[in-house]
Amino acid sequence: MATIGKRISKKTIDDSRGLVSLSERVKIRIEENYSYILGAAVVCLVVVVILVGFRSYKDRAERRAQEEYATLFAQWPAVSSNAGEWEKLIPALERFVGEHGGTRPGLNARMDLAVACFNAGRYEDSLKWGTEVLRKTPRGNDLRPLAHYQVALTYQAMERYEDALNQWNVLSGEGFPGLERLVSWNKARIASKKMDYAGALEHYESALKAPGEYPSDALLENEVSAIKRKTGAAAGSDQPGAAAANP
């Protein structure tokens, strides 16, 4: 029995030594790596400070850009202004984009450039700025319908009708409310330019059924009447004796 007690006592002492040894080893390990642990903590702190500072800097940059953009927007010409008036605005907008391109007002200014260049007759430049807005904005962004609209109008002005149709189809497919009337009207005009009068009348009918105030019913009906006159004249010229009646 005494031998067993001695064994238990010795085992307990050995276990105790093992525990002490383990705690000492942990302590030593921490002391050995203290400088590294402290360094890691300092790095984390520096990263946090940098991120907070960067956010603060971005906020200040946004506010400054908004203030300057408001001043710039006050120079916006009237809708009826001639190409020369729009041309005057373009350098200021380009300068603003160069200084504040990474801000939300900088993105708005790109959209403004697409409009200004279009009204100045600079269609290639309008296309460049409009497509840049599309490239920089995700689906659902409120600038996307404006950009699609402007790019489509620019393609129409350049007589690139298939490209314009693609833009109108994308605009229609993205489900922006209140635009179906406008989209159908422009599709009708493109079909008419391509002398697809049946297709044009179909799109005009869709436009008249769609909700909205622009284009007005009167404008749509006038354009429908003009197409019907064209198709009626063409049908009349195919009738026997038409040439004799209209020498």
Image (cartoon, grey):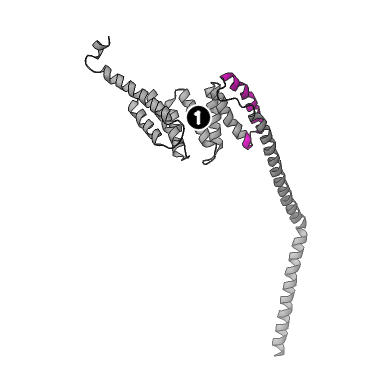
Rendering coords of residue 45 (x, y %): 73, 51
* Closer to the camera in the image, 26 or 99: 99
97 is higher (above) or lower (below) than 6: above
> Few, some or many C-alpha atoms within 10 Å of disc 1 (few <14, some 14-19, many ≥20)?
many
Q: Quadrant of the N terminus?
A: bottom right
**What x and y, as percent, mark residue 80?**
55, 23
Which residue was labeled with disc 1? 151
Q: Amino acid at mark 1?
A: Val
Quadrant in which residue 162 is drawn: top left
Is residue 71 visible in this depiction of the protein? yes
Residue that protrudes farthest toward the left in the picture? 240
User: Bounds of the magenta span?
Assistant: 83-105
Between 216 and 235, the residue placed more toward the observer is 216
Magenta segment: does it hold 101?
yes
Left or right relative to 236: residue 156: right
Horizontally, residue 245 falls left or right of residue 208, namely left
**Element type at mark 1:** helix
- Horizontal side of residue 242 vs 217, given as left or right: left
Q: Position of residue 184 (x, y in %)?
A: 41, 32
Residue 53 position in % (x across, y down): 72, 44
- Can I make out residue 195 in this image? no
Q: Nearer the viewer, residue 61 or 232?
A: 232
| Residue pictured at 52% horizontal, 36% vertical | 144
Q: Which quadrant of the figure has residue 61?
A: top right
Instruction: Give the residue drawn at x 46%, y 25%.
Output: 156
Q: How many marks?
A: 1
* Magenta region, main secondary structure: helix
